[in-house]
Structures are given as structure tokens and as C-alpha cells.
């Protein structure tokens, strides 16, 4: 398993992952839906985000990576935000956001993907990365229950 940057060479694998989301987790599939209309444009947007150019309002520079197995199946997606300079990112989303395709959840891929992404965080000069999880993401910590902290 490895993390790879977005690539048009993996279009069919990405679209298969998207279908998995659309069929089994429609709410989260929306994040990837623009890949259906024009995959090349979608890849360009992800690359632009990594370079910090043509950012949409409220977005910060962000590097995207796909977790692929030896058959080039995309198991998940991870995003490393270069900074958390707005309130939403600093309080809720953090430096790292990720999704595991529904068919591959519960197998430890999220932890593996996070471990593989940490060198990318370091390359960006981020000394302390903020990682957050929603209550339903109990698998994030091997099934440990997170304590919610109210502010």
C-alpha cells in the first residue's frame, strides 16, 4: 500500500471508489461528485489546491493523496491542509481530513493512511498537526471512544 498524488492514470479506480461512496455513503460522495463531470478538471483543481493557486473562497492550500493497494484500487483519500488559518479549520476540520471507501472500512486502512501521510505533514513544516474525528469515527482510534469536549 502507498499514498500517491491524484493522477488521471487512476481515473477508473477513482470512479469505482466514487461509486462505492455513492452507493453506500451518499452524504460523503458529494465531495467527489465533480470528478464525474470532468475528471481532468477535477485533477487540475486538486493540483491547484496543492500549489495554493485558484483556491475557492474559504479554502487553504491542501495536498491530496490516494491510498492505493497493489492492484491500484483506491482504498481512501487523505487531505493535508498546509495551514488551519480559519476558524472552521482550527476548531473543527484540522490539518488532516480523510475518507476510507465504504467497502474498505473497519480494516485499519485509516490508521495506515494517516501514518503514511505524517511525512507529508513534516515536509510542510507543520510541527503539531490537528486531527479531529466525528463521533461516528470510533474506528479512528482502534475502536476507542472519544470524549467530546465542549467549548
Image (cartoon, rainbow, N blue to C red):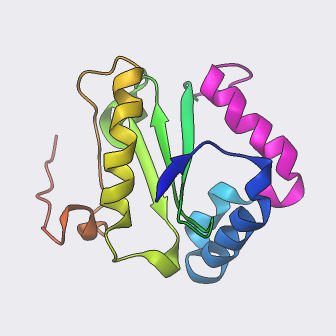
Q: Position of residue 36 (x, y in %)?
A: 82, 61
Q: Nearer the viewer, residue 23 or 74?
A: 74
Q: Nearer the viewer, residue 31 or 143?
A: 143
The image quadrant that residue 117 belongs to is top left
Decide: is 81 above or below 21. above
| 72 left or right, relative to 94 | right
Q: Position of residue 26 (x, y in %)?
A: 61, 74
The answer to whether residue 56 is seen in the rendering is no
- Asked whether residue 96 is drawn in magenta, I would say no
The answer to whether residue 44 is seen in the rendering is yes
Q: Which residues are magenta?
A: 35-58
Q: Nearer the viewer, residue 35 or 13?
A: 13
| 9 left or right, relative to 145 | right
Decide: is 56 above or below 26. above
- Asked whether residue 51 is drawn in magenta, I would say yes
Magenta stretch, overall SS: helix
The image quadrant that residue 90 belongs to is top left
Residue at 46%, 76% in the rendered image: 104
Residue at 34%, 49% in the rendered image: 114
Residue at 55%, 66% in the rendered image: 70
Amino acid at each position: 500500500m502507498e499514498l500517491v498524488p491524484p493522477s488521471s492514470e487512476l481515473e477508473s479506480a477513482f470512479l469505482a471508489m466514487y461509486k462505492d461512496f455513492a452507493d453506500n455513503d451518499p452524504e460523503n460522495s458529494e465531495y467527489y461528485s465533480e470528478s464525474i463531470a470532468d475528471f481532468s478538471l477535477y485533477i487540475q483543481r486538486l493540483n491547484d489546491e496543492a500549489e495554493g493557486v485558484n483556491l475557492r473562497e474559504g479554502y487553504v492550500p491542501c495536498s491530496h493523496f490516494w491510498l492505493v493497494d497493489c492492484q491500484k484500487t483506491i482504498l481512501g483519500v487523505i487531505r493535508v491542509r498546509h495551514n488551519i488559518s480559519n476558524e472552521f479549520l482550527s476548531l473543527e476540520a484540522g490539518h488532516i481530513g480523510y475518507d476510507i471507501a465504504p467497502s474498505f472500512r473497519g480494516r485499519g486502512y485509516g490508521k495506515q493512511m494517516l501514518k503514511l501521510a505524517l511525512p507529508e505533514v513534516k515536509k510542510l513544516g507543520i510541527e503539531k498537526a490537528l486531527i479531529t474525528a466525528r463521533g461516528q469515527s470510533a474506528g479512528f482510534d482502534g475502536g476507542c471512544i472519544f470524549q467530546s469536549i465542549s467549548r
